[in-house]
Image (cartoon, coloured by chain):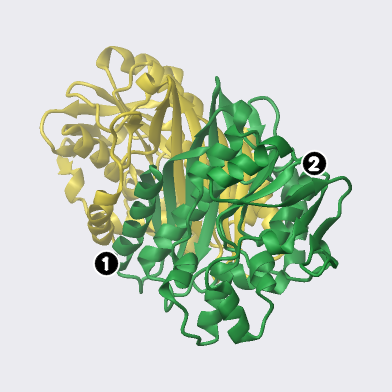
Chain colours: A green, B yellow
Amino acid sequence: MSTEGEFELIARLAPFLATGGDDLVVGSGDDAAVLDLDGRGVCLAVDVLVDEVHFRRDLSSLADVGWKAVAVNCSDIAAMGATPTVAVVGLCRPASVSGEEIEELYRGMSEACERWGLRLVGGDTVSSQALALSVTVMGDVEPAKAVRRSGARAGDRLVVVGALGAAAAALAGFRAGLDVSDELLAAHRRPIAHVEAGTALANAGATAMIDVSDGFGADLLHICEASEVGALVDAASLPAGVGVAAVAVQLGRDPLEFVAGGGDDYALLAAVPPDAADQIAAALGGAVVGEVTEGGVATLRMGDGTTRDLAGMGWDHYADAGEQA
Amino acid sequence: MSTEGEFELIARLAPFLATGGDDLVVGSGDDAAVLDLDGRGVCLAVDVLVDEVHFRRDLSSLADVGWKAVAVNCSDIAAMGATPTVAVVGLCRPASVSGEEIEELYRGMSEACERWGLRLVGGDTVSSQALALSVTVMGDVEPAKAVRRSGARAGDRLVVVGALGAAAAALAGFRAGLDVSDELLAAHRRPIAHVEAGTALANAGATAMIDVSDGFGADLLHICEASEVGALVDAASLPAGVGVAAVAVQLGRDPLEFVAGGGDDYALLAAVPPDAADQIAAALGGAVVGEVTEGGVATLRMGDGTTRDLAGMGWDHYADAGEQA
């Protein structure tokens, strides 16, 4: 689906989605919804992975796919400052997929559940033409501590935890037939959700947070739009994944295309008050990459002092490449 | 998928699914999982509907399909004695399905959400070859009042709320080219979740409960297996849907095939202590259809006094027909 089509669809469906009110602390349009149950905040996030759209079986094992389906949801939960608790899975199974293969998929989900301390508590497996998994993860958060996309304020620092560009570079290199390292491929196959970091950023007073799934630039713009702010980012400070630059050189592409435009990173991007940013970034092995500004423009400052408008950089096709296998 | 294949798959995946313990009041293997959050019980149920497997677009509008995806999950929540609160949807969308059609699907989900008082709080829409919806519904229940499949005791009465056989008869009639009434077709297109009845049955002390999705006989056997009990059911007391008998006559089939074997009913079947059964059944417009017995045999007593073993009645293909469009 094109990015334009996606925006149109979101607008079309908005009237049917609850955005908040009463006990609905966070509604549709954020990384996860949050419901306040007498002081316990319950988060809910859903992500769907489809064969040949989000993964390809010559690159990822079904255990990898299962892992990823849980991990990307845990990343959404982390971006609220929440902790995942349980998951359920809706599985569309073509007749060509054997019981052993479904078991492998579940093993991968189970490994990811163990990694992030949640439990797989149910599912529905149905016949279908295409293999697809829809995983829903529930999370736990103090309602008052849930971090939306919409709270960033001018002067806040932008903190990134996790590496950028690795998943997109791995996929691009694999597609081009390069000899991509297993370490780099792992960024695509078995992404890491930064759950502990999400909680720590929330506790450090993060005013807005998102997980980087569409690409750093696109997700920063999501925060800017929701918070009605701008941003100034130092390109040199963006934490590129190990091996990204080498793949870019071999492909004759600018590493920034992967780092700022790639997607599928599952890093966390947070706006943090200036007096807390350096300390929390250092504690989490993250990076302060820029700051929140007045106005709606998100600017990337290059090493040579020139600036570029993040919204106009036209990385959509790389973002697509990052999201689509 | 054949019933045999489904049982094998369930056994294969069991090691990866949490069945309970600690704060997990009800784990995998019931209508919904229940987590105890400091005294608030949170239910989670998931169901997937796939085009040409669970619905056919010459019979159901996409608004019907959206309604049904929410309703069948609300029925699972109802079978725990819980009340649905919020839903999220994972939607697999082929390029051939327009934005208007997706909007129609959401409108149907929204109508069902309004009917049962829950809110649609998020979703993920992805490209796919086949149209499929995976809806997850969260529910609210006092943890101590959550009704499992496993608590039925010999002497309890079996109570059914809702009509049996209508959805399966509607589908069979439609397939055979009969002139099926809109009222009967509605049982297939827009099933009703008996949420208020589920809560009332729980409050009346129901010891076990399930929603009838696989067919009355199959779901009664699920309660018998989970509770390690048997059952004796009066065939004449089963509440057949209006118009079921007429379709059966036209097709030259026994109405009981639809009523006890059909599936897709979303009636509730509960085991209720004998002193409470008649009163609660009457209050809910339901029927007392039999009783729970010692031992593992589920018996259907026919009008002529003969008996049949429900487990051996070989309705699997009708159950399949009920679940598959």
**Image coords of residue B17 (percent x, y):** 30, 46
Q: Which residue is mark 1?
A: A100
Kind of residue at badge 2: Gly
**Image coords of residue A36 (percent x, y):** 58, 26
Q: Which residue is mark 2?
A: A155
User: Viewed as shown, does residue B298 lie left or right of B207?
Assistant: left
Q: Is residue A205 above or below residue A4?
A: above
Q: Is residue B242 visible?
A: no
Q: Is residue B244 above or below residue B287?
A: below
Looking at the rendering, in which quadrant would you find the N terminus of chain B? Answer: bottom left
Q: Residue at x 54, y 62 (%)?
A: B56
Choose the circle earlier in sequence order: 1 or 2: 1
Which numbered tag is attached to residue A59? Answer: none
Nearer-the-camera pick, B201 or A119 = A119
Which residue sits furthest top?
A: B275
**Image coords of residue B163 (percent x, y):** 43, 37
Chain that bears disc 2 = A
Q: Residue at x 17, y 43 (%)?
A: B308
How far apart marks 1 and 2 lie (CA) works out to 53 Å
Q: Is residue B41 visible?
A: yes
User: Are discs 1 and 2 located on one and the same chain?
Assistant: yes
Where on the picture, by quarter, is residue B289?
top left
Q: Residue at x 15, y 28 (%)?
A: B293
> Considering the numbered disc 1 on the image, is that residue within a helix, a strand or a loop?
helix
Nearer-the-camera pick, A118 or B69 = A118
User: Viewed as shown, does residue A154 lie left or right of B2?
Assistant: right
User: Viewed as shown, does residue A319 lie left or right of A163?
Assistant: right
Chain that bears disc 1 = A
Q: Which class describes the residues within 10 Å of circle 2: few (<14), some (14-19), or many (20+)?
A: some
Kind of residue at badge 1: Glu
